[in-house]
Amino acid sequence: MKSDNSALTTAKAARGGVSPSNGKASSKILTVSLESACLGRAVVLRCQGQVIFRSEALGLSGLIYEVLPQARRMVVDLAAVRSLDSGALGELVLTHMWAEAAGYELRFSSPTEPIQQLFESTNLISVFNVYATVEDALETLHHSETLPS
C-alpha cells in the first residue's frame, strides 16, 4: 500500500529545519517521512517530534508546498507530534489556505490529544480537514476522487 520516498524527503526537508526520518527520532526536532498511498492516489507525510521553532514550521510547510502540486492529495499524519507552537499553527493555516485555493486536497490525521485540544481551542478544527486515522483521511480522498464532477 505504501512505498517510502526517503530520497525526496531528505533532499527537500533538510532545507527547512525538518529532518528526514532515519529510524531514530530526537525528542527536540521534527522528523518526517513521505510515502505514497495507493488508496486515493495520495501521499502521506508522517511527522514525529515537535514543531516549536520557526525553521521547523517553515520546513514542514515548505515540504508540503513542494510535494503537493505533483501529488495533488496529501495526508499529514500527526500521530507522533507532541506539540505545535503558534508559529507552526500559523504556517499550517497558511498552507491549508494555499492548498485549498490551488485546488489541492490537504488532510490532517491522527492528532494526539494535545494537538486535538489545540485545534479545538483555536477553532481550527472547523477549518482543517482532520480525521482520526490516516486510513480515514485516505478513504475520504478516494471517495472524493470517485464522485462525479
Image (spheres, rainbow, N blue to C red):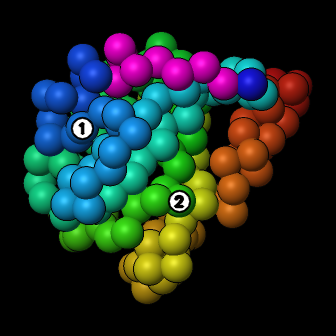
8 vs 56, left or right, is: right
At label 2, which amino acid type do we have?
Ala
Task: Pick whichever, 71 or 102, lies toward us.
Answer: 71
Label 1 vs label 2: CA separation?
A: 17 Å
60 vs 34, left or right, is: left
Helix, strand or loop under label 2: strand
Residue that carries the numbered disc 2 in the rendered image: 79
Task: Pick whichever, 6 or 75, lies toward us.
Answer: 6
Callout 1: 10 Å neighbours few (<14), some, many (20+)?
Answer: many
Residue that carries the numbered disc 1 in the rendered image: 19
At label 1, which amino acid type do we have?
Ser
Task: Pick whichever, 33 or 133, lies toward us.
Answer: 33
Name the residue at 46% across, 59% down: 80
Q: Is residue 99 visible?
A: no
Whether residue 5 is in magenta: the answer is yes
Residue 44 on image: x %, y %? 55, 35
Name the residue at 75% across, 46% down: 135
Q: What's drawn in magenta, residue-wise?
A: 2-9
Helix, strand or loop under label 1: strand
Residue 120 on image: x %, y %? 50, 80
Rendered position, 103 above or below 118: above
Marking on residue 91: none
Q: Which is more N-terminal, label 2 or label 1? A: 1
Callout 2: 10 Å neighbours few (<14), some, many (20+)?
Answer: many
Q: Is residue 89 visible?
A: yes
